[in-house]
């Protein structure tokens, strides 16, 4: 079956949102297909009635399809009646149109049906997993993947659509708003999408609409709107101000915004979708204060990458990587060098935590279906663009990004097409770079084997030997050389499994460190990975030690353990000497925790948490391998206070709570790969 993909919303903190789990288009051809449609929806009775005139110019073989939930009341083409396209009422309607040479062919299809009830208890994953057309007073969502309208299979399309709704409801689809009428009889709006696009999603609800104008580059008017449920309509102005800020940024960075409107639409379910000209976000998501500064920008940028330049899904989806790099990551760079460095380290750390078999080549990523695919499809891909910028320099990279936009707008674009644009603009051969990062899974594991220096008449000669796993990658390895005068970064072009480099330096080198700012996508050594709380949460081999004996405390501790691990914990006895290398989670009251640590001959409570707050959690590595996470509280109430918040802080190495409030948190400093110069 053929359906198109909508872009994800990237809300890491919420774990709400990911890519829709729709199927992937097998073949997308640009053919001249146009829909002219009228749809009436009655949300109270969940009824839809539609009429579509489908025009195909220069037709080749065609297939038309409509979902099984609908009745066809009339279907005719230039050649006469077409039948209803199915034999049994539980089948989708499918019409196979034979090839016939002519200038154009037209189909007129009338259809109707009842929509599934809106179920606001569904979470985002469930909404994604079932592209079903739903309707109710609080909201209607007809996702493209539900086949809610008769479609020509496998083609980009242009469309015009007229939406009719009862009074009090408003609705929209992606595209330009042509006309809008509201009266006591009802609401009616016409939209047009004049460029070839992937499909149609329709949204409606009891919206309060706020409209503002924005003047884009070349003085082009862009209409900005919020379609918000009444209970959040006071958020409109702040959201519209943020949209302006992002349009400004991306127009000057990439080029003209490709559409005449952008809308933010609220959804009664906790979902998140990005489509051309709009984003559809859960009411509760929109209430979160950080969404404006993170996910909103990511979604707006998808109007360029993903919904403006289309990925060639068969050969890999590059759009999430480029969007993550130019949105989520770019915001960190604006914040500070330190914040950007932390994000890169986070990517490498997550990659290091992948278990064998979870890693795939970047070119195989099509859309996000689970956490591991995000680590490759978003993070590794974002790091790919980061390394490409490092290689080409900021100015050339910037011109290439603009070139990509100018030449590939509204066209299906593969990784190879991107390579071509970057090669033309940079004048460099990038085949080796693209091939090694896209077609290979894994990452190079690089170490400094040796560093020796000898004094010469003019200064010092430093000989460094680098070694990497085979088959070798070609990488520019940043090396920090420390002398009494300070630290200088040098870049070494490593191409072989083992390679010697000689540098002439004015000062005596004391130590060398490998890639101290995490600018290379590489496999971290185990001592380069700081333990974080997430390990005991996600690793299914984790063993749990519950220290309290008293019944109530024990019950809360067990509840906390299962909340953290999202499964029934494997509990081992506190008196048992820990021998496993699997991660271990320990939960207890303060004095018991201290005694247990001493009995196990483990290091005592670290200074970062000692004596602070009502509850503390921290991680440590055990001498025999394996990580340990300890949760220590002053009393049972303080333990109970952790039930809701603590599971959200998996990224941290340590955290201190006062009641439910976080008062301190952080990631352990990790030792870099540092070698003393001999
Ligand atoms: Zn995305």
Image (cartoon, grey):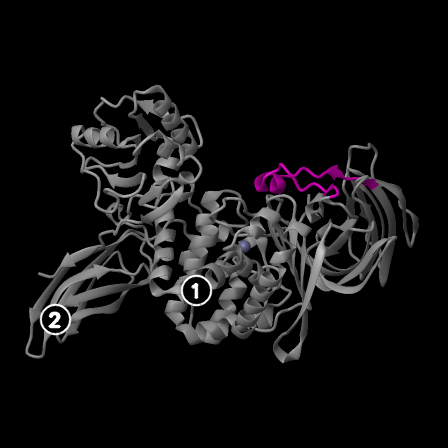
Q: From the viewer's perspective, tell me whether residue 481 is left or right of residue 520.
A: left
Which residue corresponds to mark 2? 461
For marks 1 and 2, give the CA distance.
34 Å
The mark that comes first in sequence, 1 or 2, is 1
Label 2 CA crowd tier, 10 Å (few <14, some 14–19, many 20+): some
Residue stretch in magenta:
113-137
Quadrant location of residue 47? top right
Q: Is residue 293 left or right of residue 243?
A: left
Counting from the top left corner in percent of width and height, residue 523 is at: 32, 50
Quadrant assignment for the N terminus: top right
Question: Dividing the picture into quarters, in which one does residue 297 lie?
Answer: bottom right
User: Label for residue 431?
Assistant: 1
Q: Looking at the image, in which quadrant does ligand 1 appear?
A: bottom right
Position of the C terminus by quadrant:
bottom left
Helix, strand, or loop for circle 1?
helix
**Ligand 1 neighbours mark 2 (CB distance < 8 Å):** no
Comparing 511 with 236, the one in front is 236
User: Which residue does the image show at 58% across and 62% down from the upper left?
Assistant: 238
């Amino acid at each position: 079956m053929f359906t198109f993909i909508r872009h994800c919303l990237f809300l890491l903190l919420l774990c709400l949102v990911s890519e829709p789990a729709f199927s992937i288009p097998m073949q997308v051809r640009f053919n001249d297909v146009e829909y002219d449609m009228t749809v009436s929806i009655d949300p109270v009775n969940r009824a839809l009635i539609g009429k579509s005139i489908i025009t195909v110019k220069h037709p080749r073989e065609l297939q038309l399809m409509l979902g099984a939930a609908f009745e066809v009341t009339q279907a005719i083409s230039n050649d006469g009646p077409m039948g209803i396209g199915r034999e049994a009422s539980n089948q989708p309607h499918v019409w196979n149109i034979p090839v016939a040479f002519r200038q154009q062919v037209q189909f007129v299809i009338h259809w109707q049906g009842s929509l599934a009830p809106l179920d606001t208890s569904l979470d985002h994953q469930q909404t994604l997993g079932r592209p079903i057309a739903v309707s109710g007073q609080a909201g209607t969502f007809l996702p493209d993947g539900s086949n809610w309208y008769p479609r020509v299979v496998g083609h980009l399309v242009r469309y015009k659509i007229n939406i009719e709704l009862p009074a009090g409801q408003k609705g929209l689809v992606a595209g330009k708003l042509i006309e809008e009428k509201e009266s006591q009889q009802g609401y009616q709006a016409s939209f047009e999408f004049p460029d070839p696009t992937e499909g149609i999603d329709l949204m409606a609800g009891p919206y309060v609409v706020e409209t503002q104008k924005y003047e884009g580059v070349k003085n082009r008017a862009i209409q900005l709107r919020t379609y918000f449920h009444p209970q959040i309509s006071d958020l409109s102005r702040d959201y519209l101000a943020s949209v302006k800020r992002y349009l400004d940024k991306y127009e000057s960075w990439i080029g003209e915004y490709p559409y005449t409107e952008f809308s933010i639409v609220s959804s009664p379910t906790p979902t998140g979708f990005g489509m051309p000209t709009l984003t559809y976000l859960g009411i509760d998501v929109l209430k979160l204060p950080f969404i404006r500064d993170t996910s909103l920008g990511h979604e707006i940028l998808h109007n360029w990458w993903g919904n403006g330049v289309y990925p060639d899904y068969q050969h890999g989806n590059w759009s999430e990587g480029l969007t993550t790099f130019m949105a989520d990551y770019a915001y960190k760079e604006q914040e500070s060098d330190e914040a950007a460095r932390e994000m890169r380290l986070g990517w490498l750390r997550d990659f290091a935590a992948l278990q064998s078999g979870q890693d795939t080549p970047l070119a195989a990523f099509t859309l996000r279906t689970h956490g591991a695919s995000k680590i490759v499809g978003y993070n590794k891909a974002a790091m790919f663009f980061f390394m490409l910028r490092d290689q080409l320099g900021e100015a050339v990279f910037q011109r290439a990004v603009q070139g990509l936009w100018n030449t590939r707008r509204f066209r299906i674009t593969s990784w190879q097409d991107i390579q071509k644009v970057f090669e033309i603009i940079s004048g460099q051969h990038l085949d080796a770079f693209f091939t090694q990062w896209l077609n290979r899974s894994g990452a190079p594991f690089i170490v400094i084997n040796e560093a020796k220096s000898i004094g010469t008449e003019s200064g010092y000669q430093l000989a460094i030997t680098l070694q990497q796993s085979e088959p070798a990658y070609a990488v520019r390895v940043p090396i920090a050389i420390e002398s009494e005068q300070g630290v200088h970064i040098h870049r070494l072009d490593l191409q072989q499994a083992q390679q010697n480099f000689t540098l002439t330096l004015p000062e005596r080198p004391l130590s060398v460190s490998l890639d101290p700012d995490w600018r290379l996508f590489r496999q971290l050594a185990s001592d380069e990975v700081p333990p974080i709380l997430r390990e005991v949460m996600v690793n299914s081999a984790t063993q749990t030690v519950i220290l309290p004996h008293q019944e109530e405390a024990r019950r809360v501790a067990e509840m906390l353990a299962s909340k953290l691990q999202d499964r029934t914990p494997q509990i081992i006895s506190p008196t048992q000497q820990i021998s496993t290398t699997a991660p271990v989670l320990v939960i207890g009251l303060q004095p018991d925790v201290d005694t247990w640590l001493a009995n196990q001959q483990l290091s005592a409570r670290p200074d970062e948490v000692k004596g602070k707050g009502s509850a503390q959690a921290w991680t440590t590595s055990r001498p025999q391998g394996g990580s340990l996470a300890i949760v220590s509280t002053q009393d049972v109430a303080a333990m109970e206070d952790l039930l809701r918040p603590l599971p959200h802080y998996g990224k941290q190495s340590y955290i201190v709570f006062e009641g439910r409030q976080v008062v301190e948190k952080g990631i352990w400093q990790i030792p870099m790969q540092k070698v003393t110069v001999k």
